Image: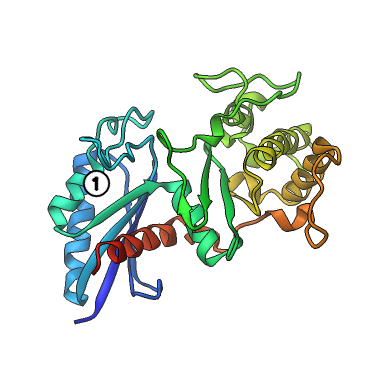
Amino acid sequence: MTEYYGAIEAGGTKFNCAICDPSGAIVQQTRIATTTPDETLESVVQWFSQQRQRGVLMGLGIASFGPLDLNPSSARYGWITNTPKPHWSDTPLLPKLASALNVPVVIDTDVNGAALAEATLGAGKNQQVVIYITVGTGVGGGVVINGAPLHGTVHPEIGHMLVPGHPQLKGQCPFHANCVEGFASGTAMGKIWGQPAETLPDDHIAWELEALILAQLCHNLMLNFSPNTIVIGGGVMAKPGLLTNVIAQTRISLNDYLVLPSNKSFEDIIVAPQLGQNSGLLGAFLLAKQSNLQLGE
């Protein structure tokens, strides 16, 4: 029978679910609203169960919002921990789906999944250190080093990196007065400027300050991780000219301290996603396939 892999990009608004063939081509896809854990996960299980008529489900990969417990030796491995998403704190996401579907399941953060996809198939292909940043409702970041997502004690929370900010900005994060997310997320921009970010005119100072904050983030990432590629995506980055300005501000901020290889420029390092809206979903597929290979399937 035909072999397939399941992939879930689990977000605060929707669970994007797909069945992929071994090459990563999406065979079937659906979106399920993120309501309560019981309701959403029941719908997810029903959908994947229905797809089994297509062939054998070899494994399932999940790229999820968090925070997550990613320690395989933990009794709560694969759980969503203390999340601001209502109803979802202390949800055993991986155990519930693994039990209901009876397949190997692997989980990582949504941004680590996106970073893995861009590092394997997209803008960071064949690079050693790839960082994926999403700037949308919040700000998140995933890190892939030599093909493996970075975990450590927990997992990267790049959006909460502290930055100098700017006198005209008041941080909106409830946890930290001057973190990137509190200055630069779409949610924060809406609170700071009193209107949704997407409605701010092109010449509004908000966009100059947005580029400044994201450049402060890139400055720190360049010095801490020495990345080959920083991929910056998310809804806020759809603003024309924003990425170009972030690159320019990063160059100014670093002030010639870093000497890049002769064949590299900041435009080569700080780039837009190549996989568009599919980064997270393809990352989940790669997690499923890699886990399946490790299990010797």
Q: Is residue 220 above or below residue 98?
A: above
Question: For this view, does 280 lie left or right of residue 196?
Answer: left
Residue 261: where, in percent of width, then height? 79, 56
Q: Is residue 235 above or below residue 55?
A: above
Question: For this view, does 275 lie left or right of residue 67?
Answer: right
- The residue lying at 22 percent from left, 39 percent from top is 92
- The residue lying at 78 percent from left, 36 percent from top is 208
Q: Nearer the viewer, residue 246 or 267?
A: 267
Question: Residue tagged by mark 1?
Answer: 94
In the picture, the quarter occupied by the C terminus is bottom left
- The residue lying at 40 percent from left, 34 percent from top is 154
Q: Nearer the viewer, residue 140 or 207?
A: 140
Residue 268: where, in percent of width, then height? 73, 58
Q: Nearer the viewer, residue 181 or 188?
A: 181
Q: Nearer the viewer, residue 121 or 196?
A: 121
Question: For this view, does 19 lie left or right of residue 203?
Answer: left
Q: Is residue 170 above or below residue 184?
A: above
Mark 1 is on which residue type? Leu
Query: What secondary structure is marked by label 1?
Result: helix
Q: Is residue 234 visible?
A: no
Residue 7: where, in percent of width, then height? 33, 60
- The residue lying at 18 percent from left, 46 percent from top is 96
Query: Farthest residue toward the bottom?
Result: 1
